[in-house]
Image: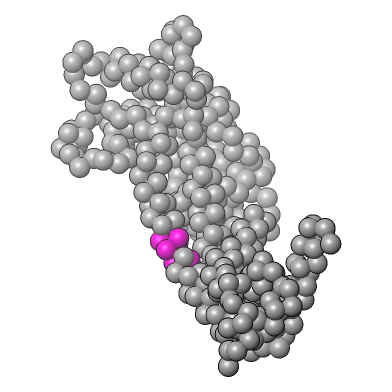
Amino acid sequence: MKSPARFFYEFTESIRIAWAQIRANKTRSVLTALGVIIGIVAVTLMGAAISGIDRGFENSLAMLGNDIFYVEKWPWFGAEDWWNYINRPSIKITDAEKLNRIIEDTPNSLLEVAVPRAGRGCSVKYGDGRVDGIFAFGTSADYARITNVDYSEGRLFNEVEANSGRAVCVLGFTVAEALFPHDSSLGHTVIVDGHPCQVIGVFAKQGEFLGLFSFDSQLVMPINAFTKMFGSRRGAQLQVKMKDILQMSAAKDQLIGAMRRVRGQLPGERDNFTVNEQQAFKAQLDPARFAIFAAGLIVTSLSLFVGAIGIMNITFVSVKERTKEIGTRKAIGARRRTILLQFLIEAVSICLIGGTVGMGVAYSLFLGIHTQMPSFPAEFSPGLVFVGMLVSVATGIASGIVPAWGASRLDPVVALRYE
């Protein structure tokens, strides 16, 4: 018999023998597979959680805009020396106009536009309905140039409405849904902390930022209307869009220089403003992501290790129980690789059964968690199924190779005399 044909025969025969042994020892096989099932459930759920957290993290950072700088009084992180920041003058709404003039007058500027933004918490009422904890902010009509948010209905205010300070607003999806559950909100007048404001648009559903802030619980209005309603003494923020993200560092340097001119700072003076960017969040949260990944890796590794020990133990027992059978097979011409393949396939088969059941249990748990907590960051992807089954096979090979190798090395004479 030619070598490939012989190997195929040995392989199929080993599968038949392995499955016959599993059927003959159903209870033992199920209990052995239980460790693998638990390990695969842990691997799959942890993988789904980590994948979801990564996707949610990236989506949240995308909401900030990777081509947007945020000019503010305070840095987002690393302000332990707060005394160096507390006496800084606040960012003014008028700083945006000055900065835009500098951008327009700068040949080949790397910056596109500066948009002012001032905000505060408020409540919004319509009829008998009321929604609290809403973040209202005022901005300019150029807000449309720095964001790609969609609208479920209506539009953003235009230049005329913004400059005249007309009391119009765009509602977040959750706000509109709460106040107008069965009707369009367009054209209706809502009360924002006692001030009437006509609804001209509703943002499409956007989601949450890292589970901390919902972009759907906000209200946007012209900044001149905002200052009429709530005053102009509160500090503002400037959102500055760059033209080319590949030149982020140069664009940031250009923005710092332009802002120093806006603020009238002399050479040698320390900046009295901070330019924040989404990379600050990434730098702060990357260690937390790594810690979650490391903890998940340790938990899943321990689970799989316990399962692998169970597989190895039962394979050793199986070798001991069938020592005479091994001796008989070797005496009539069975090769070492045939014996090795037989026990290795038996170990892998148990792991595959455990892996398949484990994937089913994990997916059921995933659906249950997703149903009860839709906002929980988890993602069950086809790639995760592939990895889970690959881990099952790897566990079977790793745990079965030692006892299978021992079985293949048995002396047939000694094996036949084994009691």
Query: Which part of the image, by quadrant, shows the C terminus?
Result: bottom right
Magenta stretch containing residue 299, yes or no? Answer: yes
Query: Which part of the image, by quadrant, shows the N terminus?
Result: bottom right
Q: Residue at x 54, y 49 (%)?
A: 55
103 or 406, nearer to the observer: 406
270 or 99, nearer to the observer: 270
Picture quadrant where residue 114 is located: top left
Instruction: Tell me if 123 is positioned left or right of 127 in this view.
Output: left
Q: Position of residue 379 (x, y in %)?
A: 59, 57
Residue that lies at the very extreme toward the front in this rendered image: 413
Q: Position of residue 318 (x, y in %)?
A: 60, 83
Q: Is residue 178 visible?
A: no
Q: Which residues are magenta?
A: 295-300
- The image shows residue 397, relative to residue 265, as above or below, that is below
Instruction: Tell me if 40 is positioned left or right of 71 in this view.
Output: right
Magenta stretch containing residue 29, yes or no? Answer: no
